[in-house]
Amino acid sequence: MSGADNVVWLGTPAFPEAARAALADTRLRANLRRATGTIRDRRLAVAAELEDWEELRETAATIKRRTLRHLDHHLLRLEKAVTAAGGVVHWASDAVDANRIVTALVKATGGGDIENHEVVKVKSMATQEIGLNEALADAGIRAYETDLAELIVQLGGDRPSHILVPAIHRGRSEIREIFRREMGEWGRPAPEDLTDDPRDLAEAARLHLREKFLRAKVAVSGANFAAADTGTVAVVESEGNGRMCLTLPETLITVMGIEKVLPSFADLDVFLQLLPRSSTGERMNPYTSLWTGVTEGDGPRNFHLVLLDNGRTATLADEVGRQALACIRCSACLNVCPVYERTGGHAYGSVYPGPIGAVLTPQLVGVENAASLPFASTLCGACYDACPVKINIPEVLVHLRAEAVEAKRRDRLLPTSEGLAMKAAGAVLGSPRRLAAVQRLAAVGARLVARDGRIGALPGPFARWSGTRDTPVPTRESLRAWWRRTRPPRSEDSSTTAQGEERR
Amino acid sequence: MRIALFITCFNDTMFPRTGRAVTELLERLGHTVEFPQGQTCCGQMHFNTGYRPETLPMVRRFAEVFAGYDAVVAPSGSCAGMVRDHHRVVAAQYGDAALAEAVQQVVPTVYELSELLVDVLGVTDVGAHFPHRVTYHPTCHSLRMLRVGDRPLRLLRAVKGIDLVELPDAESCCGFGGTFALKNADVSNAMLADKMRHVQDTGAEILSAGDNSCLTHIGGGLSRLRTGVGTMHLAEILASTEGDVR
């Protein structure tokens, strides 16, 4: 299994097709609209409370840029600090590598007394990215997701659809059904009289998970940040289930993308203000766990930090695209994106959905393997405005579009029909004379198909446009023609030379 | 001022009345408007669809044709945004030092219409008269690439006789996005449906914007549904005077 297989979900259709299916699901659209709308409003309100919000964003962006420029240096510092604090650092170049390391660690430290090895997990996109749960299952190890939303996704045999709220596409009644049907298969069953009241659902999850927290010898976590100077790793979460994972088991294995490192512990000051406000619209997230190696008599006795590359170094090499690595996984861009709001996360066919997914995924797996994603945006720019670390997502989108087009050109002997159309359009738009000729032709042609001054359904590629929209008829006289007719050029400022193309 | 009109290829072909309105308006304000016949296109369609090298001839042409004016005005936020944000990128990536220099010279003179009026010419009341109920859609590129802010609304508020009504959820994208409307037609339609609902909720007779491309998309939908709501570029409203039938 390669990294690309996990970051992108093989078999998912390209974005336009997957989006069509999502759009047809009216319940999904209603759930998404309500959820993203609520978080969006809350985010704006709490961001406005901080007078220095824009300065914080700028500082965060600067720290991230600086760190990425010297990533190797900071990672080596982190390794040194973690090791000095009694942790063990592992370097994983790709998904296969990372899964092999984690599987071996679980087998070595999980305790021989358990017939079937098991681990508890606190949500980690990095382990989704590498397909860790599946790799563990292949090795006879069961991984239990303990974040409530992740639990819902796992029990439902589903995939996450939002960075922060992985089960955002599910309604309460669906969750009740999943709990009643599946919990018994994985452990303590849901109570017979379970309702779809959120408190009831949370209580069922609490009881179901508690026995796992108390039994598991090994936990696997992700990391939001790691400070290179102290070797401190940080996880922020809302439920406290993460804290259970981070403190109860004997062994803690953290899988962290190499881009999560920060130069110093003091940098957390900036990010712990930005992240909760940008993600959940809260001033402070309920649980912030920080740990540095191991401490005698407190918490896990073994700590392993797996530093995951899996396409990140290649991404770093791209001067425009690398800014995507600054992402702190807050999901603010998803919640403001009009495309995400209507299609949901599954349409992106990747662990990383929404605008950030559309720029991160193609870079991690190679743009030719996710070529529809950079085009899954109107370039409206709402994501850039919302991003707490100022990732210029529209800039990276158009950058990757150029790479997608180039990749297609390399792979094909003949140009695509789009390529031919663009070439033809380029020839017309390269010359005012040709443009004027096409304008005259268009005016005549359009008049032939128009009715009541409007053009209705059109054939070919334009059917997708004209299915729902009328098109105005190009006027008989373009502006340039009108200008020439009504305002003959004065000899000193313009000339109508044979080409008629130059001002002077 | 000696102002060059960059009409944009789309307006030139489809909406010449917008260019005529810009001309009338600026001349009414006492300025000289010129139309360099060598102009074609800003290259946005090619650039945004990933055909970046193909953009170079258009960038080159733009820098040549529009050199030396006091100001260049474009009645399109997205084309002005393309020139301002991306011509330098194309010149640096594929052009030569001379082109980079030429682009560097011309870019600061390029304005979207509301910027030119408010920031450069210093007017908000352009002496227009337009006795109709109007709502305004702030197109994404005007809003977030150019940051024109409330300049168009300040101009509209000063129009005599106008009944300007606020568009709900105004800042959300209409779903046009250039080739997005073809490549992701279903999502585009879903976004259009919401935008049209908001427009109809206002009870406006006219939807206005600073970009005819977005207006073609929204207006095309409104026309197909036979809503009776018309679309009009900001320039046409600002050019209207008492007695005009617009």
Image (cartoon, rainbow, N blue to C red):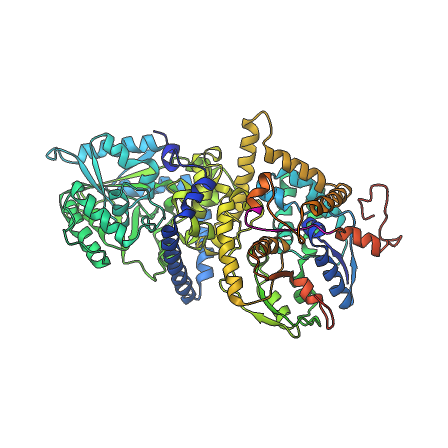
- The answer to whether A360 is drawn above or below residue A268 in the figure is above
**Magenta stretch encompasses residue A468:** yes
Could you say where residue A401 lies in the image, as x and y percent from the top left? 54, 40
Pinpoint residue A277: horizontal percent, then vertical percent. Answer: 37, 59
Q: Position of residue A81 (x, y in %)?
A: 30, 43
Q: Residue furthest right?
A: A491
When the figure is inspected, residue A409 is found, relative to residue A319, above or below; the finding is above
Q: Is residue A404 above or below residue B64?
A: above
- Taking the view exactly as shown, the residue that stands out farthest to the left is A113
Q: Magenta span has A148? A: no
Which residue is the extreme one toward the bottom?
B161
Q: Is residue A309 left or right of residue A110?
A: right
Task: Say left or right for A401 vs A122.
Answer: right
Residue closer to the observer: A323 or A34:
A34
Residue A201 versus residue A242: which sits nearer the camera? A201
The residue range painted magenta reads: A466-475
Provide the major secondary structure of the magenta segment. Answer: loop
Residue A67 visible (yes or no): no
Q: Residue at x 52, y 54 (%)?
A: B192
| Residue found farthest to the top | A413
Q: Residue at 86% across / 41% down in the picture?
A: A498
Q: Residue at x 36, y 46 (%)?
A: A161
From what the image shows, is residue A83 above or below residue B128? above
Q: Is residue B200 visible?
A: yes
Position of the N terminus of chain A, as image quadrant, is top left
Q: Residue at x 60, y 40 (%)?
A: A459
